[in-house]
Amino acid sequence: MLLDLLGVTGSLRWTLEILEGRPFAMSAALVRRPPRIELDGMRFESGNIEARGAFAQDGDGRAGAFLVTTGVLSAGLSIEGGELHVTSSPGEGWLARRLDAITGR
């Protein structure tokens, strides 16, 4: 259901579905101000995989940013205009800039 909400398709969806059935922990703060919905402070952990970020959806579309790490490898996933973009080896600054743009804080 979360993958549908985020509009995740293709190889990313396949990768995330591999985690199905594995123990995981997830937390987020839900903020609803119609027509906007935000999942802020999202955190996902399963084994050595961790993802942090935020997601928002309103009348203008979907936007999100997540920093995914596993061991020493990392990837940045951003959703802009409903399109998914992948950045290899981003840092904390990358995530902070994208979260500022999404949440406006």
Image: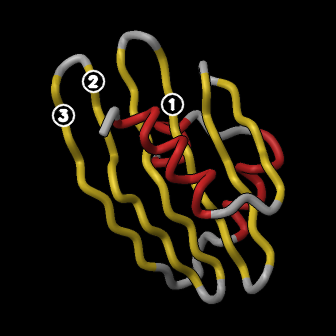
Marks 3/1: CA distance? 15 Å
Residue 66 location in percent, x, y?
57, 53
Mark 1: amino acid: Ala
Residue 38 location in percent, x, y?
31, 38
**For marks 2 and 1 on the same chain, the one whose residue lies earlier in the sequence:** 2
**Left or right of 97, for residue 10:** right
How many residues crowd mark 1 within 10 Å: few (<14), some (14–19), many (20+)? many
Residue beneath the point at 31% across and 59% down: 28
**What residue did someone put label 2 on?**
36
Q: Which mark is residue 20?
A: none
Mark 2: amino acid: Arg
Q: Are marks 3 and 2 in contact (CB under 8 Å)?
A: yes
Marks 2/1: CA distance? 11 Å
Residue beneath the point at 64% across and 78% down: 49
**For marks 3 and 1 on the same chain, the one whose residue lies earlier in the sequence:** 3
**What residue did someone put label 1 on?**
63
**What residue did someone put label 3 on?**
32
How many residues crowd mark 3 within 10 Å: few (<14), some (14–19), many (20+)? few
User: In the figure, residue 8 lies in which quadrant?
Assistant: top right
